[in-house]
Amino acid sequence: MEPVPDGSRDLTAHVALDACAAATAGLGAGAELLDQRTALRELGVSGERPPLSRASTDPAGYVRALASAGEAAELTARGGLGDFGWLRQWVAPGVRP
């Protein structure tokens, strides 16, 4: 079956991220391996619950923030999605955000 990017098929690719990082080692641009939890936390994603006091002052906003925190917690969970590997490749030698 041909892959179709419409969500009707599960496409999985297994990539040796350490080999990808090693392949760029001599090119002057840094690469590092990290887990999804670390990468997302560095981007400001947190599974922290909103303050309960917000529920009485802004109930709808509290529910939205609670749902967002739940999604973030799922993406960063140990033993789950947070353990997925990421390869971060710097685009310019020695330049880091």
Image: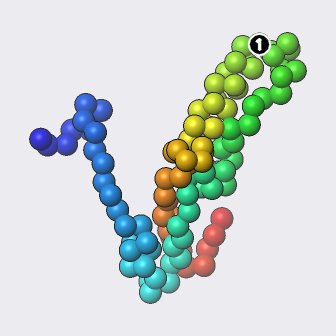
Residue 24 visible in the snapshot:
no
Q: Quadrant of residue 4?
A: top left
Instruction: State how many labels appear.
Output: 1
Say if 32 sits above or below 58 in the image: below
Q: Is residue 4 left or right of residue 44?
A: left
The residue shown at (51%, 73%) is 31
Q: Nearer the viewer, residue 47 or 2?
A: 47
Outermost residue toward the bottom in this view: 26
Residue 50 visible in the snapshot:
yes
Say if 51 sits above or below 79 in the image: above
| Residue type pointed to by label 1 | Pro
Say if 65 sits above or below 87 in the image: above
Q: Quadrant of residue 23?
A: bottom left
The residue shown at (50%, 83%) is 28
Q: Position of residue 64 (x, y in %)?
A: 67, 21
The residue shown at (75%, 31%) is 49
Outermost residue toward the front in this view: 79
The residue shown at (77%, 13%) is 59
Q: Position of residue 11 (x, y in %)?
A: 28, 44
Q: Position of residue 97 (x, y in %)?
A: 66, 65
Residue to which mark 1 is pinned: 59
Q: Is residue 49 left or right of residue 95?
A: right
Q: Quadrant of the N terminus?
A: top left
Task: Judge the density around disc 1: few (<14), some (14-19), many (≥20) Cα neighbours within 10 Å.
Answer: few
Colour convention: rainbow
**Helix, strand or loop at mark 1:** helix
Q: Position of residue 9 (x, y in %)?
A: 24, 36
